[in-house]
Amino acid sequence: MPHRGCVAIPSENGSNPSPEQILERAMALGQQAEVFHVVASSTPVHFEANKIKAVDTNESAAAAVRLIKDGRVGFSSTSDLADVTALVEAALDTAPYGAEAKFDFPGATEFPNVPVYDAAVEEATTEEMAALGQRVVDELRAYWDAVQVEGGVSRSTSTVTLVNSNGGHFSYARSGFRIGFEGTVIRGEDMLFTFDGESSVHRISDPDAIIASIIRQLGWATESATVENKTMPVILMPTAVPSILLNPLLAGLNGKTVLQGTSPLAGRLGERITDPRFSLTDDATLPYIPASRMSDDEGVATRRLPLIEAGVATTYFYDLQTAGLAGAASTGSGERGVGSLPGPSTGVLLVGEGDAELDDLIADVDEGLIVEALLGAGQSNILGGDFNANVLLGYKIQDGRVVGRVKNTMISGNAYTALNDLIAVGAKGRWVRGGLYTPAVALANVSVAANG
């Protein structure tokens, strides 16, 4: 059922002012005002050189004030909540130089029920977290004793609250549990980096999937292989899909670039821009996904937002200000940190699954490349879709099987061209960094260049 807020949120330090108290002060100085408030706590357990290195606990509280004064936007933020007057006056001081406000703050809103908090996360002890991490270390070392393992296990909670002068309000609690480890093998001047991780709203008790993934990477990289400088099929593993394919698509569908006239997708809604087998959806309403939320960071309810359906561009995404400038409505896509103004951004991305199993994709390639990880973002002209990226971890396919790891290799091409020249989309996706679900994607013709 729709509702206006979440229950069972962690209590705040009574010595700090509440968001409502900050808002009251801000309303006295601006025609409209908004307070964005975050209280967070995290406990990471760090591993280095195959053993536990440190256990930390971090706590923070911060608030941002955005107000509209004489038609212009003022903004300020602080992690020192002792002086509310200074916070609000700083926002007021910036207003004469701020952008012209093309929006009003939302009023009271009915939000979808999007649970993203599990109390069991806070019950995980540091001893249990350390044991989870040590299990990863031990099993990777048992597979290959030359592996140096580092990474960590962490738990976190936060409470996000927004109140504004038009009656808009939400407050919800979020929990997080993450395991992430890197296995490095050094052989002379050669360094092999493998990595995997998992993020969840729930407490993670079984790291088997992470261990299996890193062992698979180590196994595929045991031997070395070389590739020729030519165009060939390239299979992007889920971890490589965002930087090569999704970043340019999202830049093109961002309402801000559309408004500025720099998007290649401006005026192209309803047109086919990729192979019909490719679809992309933003849906932050999915329950118990780390990046989900009932509201964006401006008080606009989240909803399922198809971006590309069967290859057709269907929606641009907007925050309040960009939507106002464009004469559109916010799509519930306003996102920010406490220290920054909101901007258009996606929440939880879903790449539609296809019908090809990974083993079958590999078996059908006579000569090609699998890309697991890239060094850097991989984009040279993100709006144009061009990419020119170093392969941090990749493997050669020869005669339908993986024959070894490639080194000093780059891939280049254009995301739009590549997405119109697909071999297939994988049948089974996985979560990447808690906010993206994607299968592998096989591209027919990508330029590959090797140095040495």
Image (tube, helix red, strand yellow):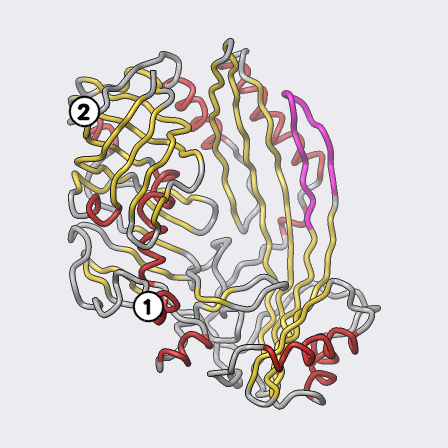
Q: Main secondary structure of the magenta part?
A: strand
Local SS, label 2: helix
Query: Residue 46 lies in magenta, yes or no?
Result: yes
Of 294 and 64, the residue lying toward us: 64
Describe residue 254's horizontal placement relative to residue 447 as left or right.
Answer: right
Disc 1 crowd rating (10 Å Cα; few below 14, some 14-19, many 20+) is many
Residue depicted at x 26% and y 67%: 266
Q: Is residue 366 above or below residue 117?
A: above
Measure the C-alpha gap from mark 2 to mark 1. Answer: 41 Å
Tally of numbered tags: 2
Provide residue 299's location: percent of width, then percent of height: 52, 75
Disc 2 crowd rating (10 Å Cα; few below 14, some 14-19, many 20+) is some
Provide residue 265's location: percent of width, then percent of height: 25, 63
Which residue is the site of mark 1?
258
Name the kind of residue labelled 2 in the image. Answer: Ala
Describe residue 32's horizontal placement relative to residue 274 as left or right.
Answer: right
Name the kind of residue labelled 1 in the image. Answer: Val
Of 257 and 141, the residue lying toward us: 257
Question: Which of the 4 quarters of the picture holds residue 442?
Answer: top left
Residue lying farthest to the top in this orientation: 188
Local SS, label 1: helix
Residue depicted at x 36% and y 60%: 282
Question: Which of the 4 quarters of the picture holds residue 178?
Answer: top right
Residue depicted at x 63% and y 42%: 154
Query: Residue 54 lies in magenta, yes or no?
Result: yes
Task: Write the start and end of the magenta stretch as one range.
Answer: 42-56
Q: Quadrant of the C terminus?
A: top left
Provide residue 263's location: percent of width, then percent of height: 30, 62
Q: Label for residue 363?
A: 2
Question: Which of the 4 quarters of the picture holds residue 33?
Answer: bottom right
Q: Is residue 66 above or below residue 148?
A: below
Mark earlier in primary sequence (2, 1): 1
